[in-house]
């Protein structure tokens, strides 16, 4: 993995994200997955295209975890181009952190530039961008829509809370 690409991702995120902090976050969830489902199940899912709860949790590390960290450090921009750029940089760094954690724990057999391929990172970054736009306009949503829409913190708790308690 190119240090230039990682440096560019840090530039996109205004150097507000700590790789160490992202790795600690990913590690907590990965450890909880191993505890809940067993090492064999996690290895099997990580090294295949299978779906299920383990795969959903890994995807949510990137999608929901990235959005949460963007909110915490003030990266959810109101300008669409800026938000899209920061979403990609954040998801890219989170993907690298997840890949390192999985690899260092012997759960991922092949490490490229993180866990997901670039195309997967782009798809997840686009979802983070759309969720960021919802976050920015949350207070302007009609009440009936707002009542059925998660805030960033509610989404984080709903999708990843059980792995962090």
Image (spheres, rainbow, N blue to C red):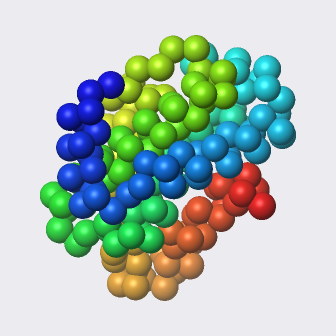
Q: Residue at x 56, y 71 (%)?
A: 153
- Could you tell me residue 158's position as x and y percent? 66, 61
Visible residue check, residue 119: no
Quadrant holding the C terminus:
bottom right
- Could you tell me residue 41's position as x and y percent? 77, 24
Q: Residue at x 24, y 43 (%)?
A: 7
Front position in the image: 153 or 108: 108
On screen, residue 133 versus residue 51, left or right, reads left
Visible residue check, residue 77: yes
Front position in the image: 159 or 35: 35
**Residue 102, above or below 31:** above
On screen, residue 149 versus residue 161, left or right, reads left
- Could you tell me residue 4's position as x and y percent? 20, 34
Q: Residue at x 48, y 75 (%)?
A: 145
On screen, residue 8 versus residue 124, left or right, reads left
Front position in the image: 163 or 19: 19
Quadrant holding the N terminus:
top left
**Residue 159, above or below 6:** below
């Amino acid at each position: 993995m190119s240090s230039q690409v990682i440096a560019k991702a840090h530039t996109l995120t205004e150097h507000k994200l700590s790789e160490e902090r992202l790795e600690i976050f990913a590690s907590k969830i990965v450890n909880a997955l191993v505890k809940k489902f067993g090492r064999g199940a996690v290895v099997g899912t990580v090294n295949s295209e299978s779906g299920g709860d383990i795969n959903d949790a890994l995807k949510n590390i990137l999608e929901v975890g990235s959005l949460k960290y963007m909110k915490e450090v003030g990266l959810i921009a109101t300008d669409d181009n800026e938000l899209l750029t920061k979403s990609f940089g954040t998801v890219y760094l989170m993907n690298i952190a997840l890949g390192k954690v999985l690899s260092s724990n012997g759960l991922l057999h092949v490490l490229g530039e993180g866990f997901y391929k670039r195309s997967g990172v782009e798809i997840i970054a686009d979802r983070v961008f759309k969720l960021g736009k919802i976050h920015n306009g949350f207070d302007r949503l009609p009440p009936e829509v707002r009542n059925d829409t998660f805030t960033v913190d509610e989404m984080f708790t709903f999708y990843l809370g059980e792995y962090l308690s």
